[in-house]
Image: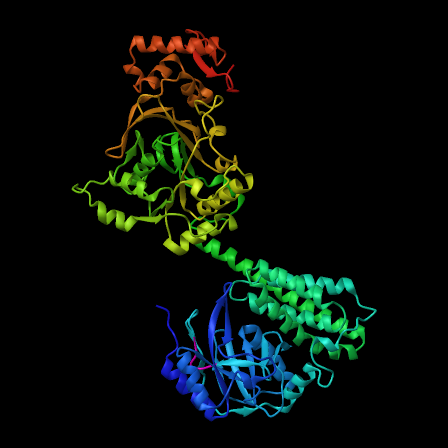
Amino acid sequence: MAKTNNPEVGLKKALQYAERGWHVFPMHFNKQAGDVVKMPLTKWAKGDDSQRATTDPAVIRRWWRRWPHAGVGIACGPSELLVIDVDGDYGAASLARLEETLGPLPTTRTVLTSRGRHLYFKTSEDLPTSAGSLGEGVDTRGVGGYVVAPPSLNQYTGVKYRWADKNAGLAPLPDPWASALLAAKGRGAGTGLGSVTRRISTTPGAYALAVLEDELDNVRQAHPGERNDALNSAAYYLGRFVGGGYLTVDEVTDALVRVAEMKGLAAGEAGATVASGLDAGSQEALILLQESSATAMERDIEDAVRKLRIRDAAARAFQAEKIAERHARSRNARKMSGSEFFLDLPAETPTLWGDGKRILWIDGEPLLICGDDGTGKSTIDHQLMAARLGFRDELLGYSVTPAEGIVLYLAMDRPEQARRAGNRLYPDSVDIDFRSNLAANLAVWRGPLPVDVLAGPEVLADWIHSEFGPVAEVHADSLKDVASKLSDDAVGSGINSAIQEVVSRGINWVGLHHQRKASGENRRPDSLSDVYGSRWLTAGQGSVLMLVKAGEFDKDQVEMRQLKEPSDRVPALLLEHDRSRGRTRVVEASQDPEQILRAAGEAGATALDVAAAMYAKDKSEVTGAEKKKADRLLARLVKSEEAVKRAGRKGGEGGTEPTRFFPVEDEGAP
């Protein structure tokens, strides 16, 4: 439950402030389009503080009976207060420069806020409320302005306004500071935008429009919680140009309100903020009219250039921080010499799943498992996760090395169905303690991702790190739930970049995906073009496996083919799923001799090699009938020009060479 202001404490403090002669009123924090704004609960009449604040105890008690959880606001003008609002590091730096020019400020009552501090000073002059007229990050609250007073609580941020030192006295505002505020206001030159209507004939329109566009960019780039302040600051700054005749009220108002609406602010609220900012900014423009246009222009240019330099430096610093963070989170070195990169290879191939040169998944390269609905992609992946967790040491006849760290399963596609399917792998009573292993070594995210993976290459990797800490590998079920419109190359490229960033941080990746809808052209999918979506989805994969239904009558039998391989191609396998136990067994190796030839590579294969692969036997176990069948099938491939035969020879120089066969597209074939 959200915290609220204590009714008794709020009323007590409001009465105490009223006894000091400070005019108080009830206020609250309100969230509008993502921004938290401070709003009086009493009627607001601009320029007449008496209608919204009072020192009358009876009125104050009546207000707090109506709004018992209200915060306490103080109207500065009738309270003879001038409050300097110092916002963040920029405000502190600006205040230090002002003190060098105007003299140091005395110690006074100070309130600590969420982003800075409020310095309270007493004054008998009608000093203005301003936004940034003294310096960036330094605002003032005087006539027409108010502040939030302790112990008010912002229920959205949890920040409570509090006095820095309750025993500090209220100091008078030094004369040089009061004079600076009055000078910025343009005393005696008129009030509001209505008194400044003439346009200077020598207006440099191009420069003014460039400044307008720059301020619009500031509003566009503002984050939630900062948008209203950014809009007010832009309006104030542009008000100087409006007051000087460089821009018109309508063109500035229309442009700012339009951008504010795009950022989610309500039109009415945005219009009021812009009008207030333009009004305040135009007052400073009255002074500019008394200067030469060249002097005013130089001052504005210097100010604009300073802002651009600060923004540019901040952008560079922020980018450097992000790069350093990414490098710090990577377990693999990214920066290395050419000799390290090309020559210092590991002594053994870092195989995660496979044996010898037949590798289904290699360390540091993503694995993609594809197939139509019902082909058992999740079933295979669940068994692969179990093997990586140490529950078994092989899968489909190939060795699996255990993971060195946390395995993360992104169960995005029908998580409850995936949950039930995976449960079949882990019976209640076995020698291995499944529960403790799964609790310690497997992390699961259930449902859609909470981040936009396409927002930047680092977004997915950063989210994984912040949510789960260091992990060894990720199993994503499935790619269609990572982003939509997978056939769009921009989307495919974005997903590929996100996966590569994950892998570059030393985190292995397994993704599940679908094939293209079967048609006359891909009735039997056997190439990367049969994988659904943009080519970028497979471009960054180290290995791609395709599961294809073996026939119409046995729904539990599928054929697995390796469409992309990190080393020698793994021969196609005929698999059978035991869905009641969540397990898969190899029925036999592929009986497709063309696939066997492709897997053999440039070395080609003999009829005996093909027969051994077809029947999953050692060559010494192949029968004469099995070899003859392989001979007949190979002869058909040669006749249909799908294979090339290189006749063998007996004896002679170089010894006996058997007859070998090659796929026709293999450039190594004779």
- Residue at the location (52% across, 34% down)? 535
Q: Give the range drawn in magenta.
A: 149-153
x and y percent of residue 192 in the render? 69, 78
**Number of marks in the rendered image:** 0
**Residue 650 drawn in magenta:** no
135 or 418, which is in the foreground? 418
- Where, quadrant-wise, is the N terminus in this rendering? bottom left
Q: Which of 597 and 526 is in front in this view?
A: 526
Nearer the observer, 447 or 274: 274
Colour setup of the view: rainbow
The image position of residue 306, as x and y in percent, is 67, 69
Q: Is residue 102 above or below residue 623?
A: below
Q: Where is residue 235 in the image (x, y as percent from the top left)?
A: 65, 69
Tell me where residue 66 sits by quadrant.
bottom left
Q: Going by the image, does 110 lie left or right of 243?
A: left
Residue 151 painted magenta: yes
Tell me, yes or no, if residue 523 can be seen here. Answer: yes
- Viewer-proximal residue, 581 or 40? 40
Q: In this view, does 235 lie above or below 51?
A: above
Question: Does the image show residue 166?
Answer: no
Estimate the x, y position of residue 487 in percent, counting from the top left: 52, 36
Magenta stretch prevailing secondary structure: loop
In the image as oriented, which residue stretches furthest toward the right? 201
In this rendering, the answer to whether 210 lies above or below 498 is below
Quadrant for residue 80, please give it.
bottom right
